[in-house]
Amino acid sequence: MQRLLRCFCCFLFALIALSEKPVAFVASSKISNSVNYADVRARVAKSFPEKANEIANLIAVLQDLSKATVDLTKQISTHCQQ
């Protein structure tokens, strides 16, 4: 289960990395043929911890959903056995 969650997080991070903002930033840098690497470093330094926090919150929600699903499944099994 932990391996699946780790794969899901990697997929989610890749999906976020390919979202509209980075693509738009790359497209605008291709037009001007110059990249302000200080700006890129500043954006990454600011956005990486924010995305990590979002992913941590998502993992917490998924874990809560998983626990709730297990509890509900046990309740249904108990009810069906009666």
Image: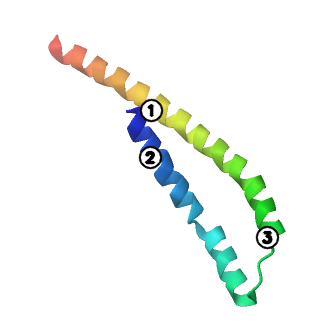
Q: In this view, does 44 lie above or below 35?
A: above
Residue closer to the observer: 46 or 57 = 46
Total number of numbered discs in the rendering: 3
Query: Considering the numbered disc 2 on the image, is that residue within a helix, a strand or a loop?
Result: helix
Quadrant (top left/top right/bottom left/bottom right) for the C terminus: top left
Q: Identify the amino acid type marked 3.
A: Tyr
**Looking at the rendered structure, which numbered label has been put on residue 37?**
3
Residue name at image x 51 percent, y 59 percent? 15
Q: Is residue 70 above or below residue 30?
A: above
**Looking at the rendered structure, which numbered label has been put on residue 65?**
1
Residue name at image x 26 percent, y 21 percent? 76
Q: Name the residue under label 2.
A: 8
Q: Identify the amino acid type marked 2.
A: Phe
Quadrant (top left/top right/bottom left/bottom right) for the N terminus: top left
Residue name at image x 77 percent, y 78 percent? 35
Q: In this view, does 79 lie above or below 19?
A: above
Residue 37, image x, y percentages: 79, 70
Residue name at image x 77 percent, y 54 percent? 45
Q: Is residue 30 above or below residue 12?
A: below
Left or right, 66 with respect to 24, comes to: left
Q: Identify the amino acid type marked 1.
A: Leu
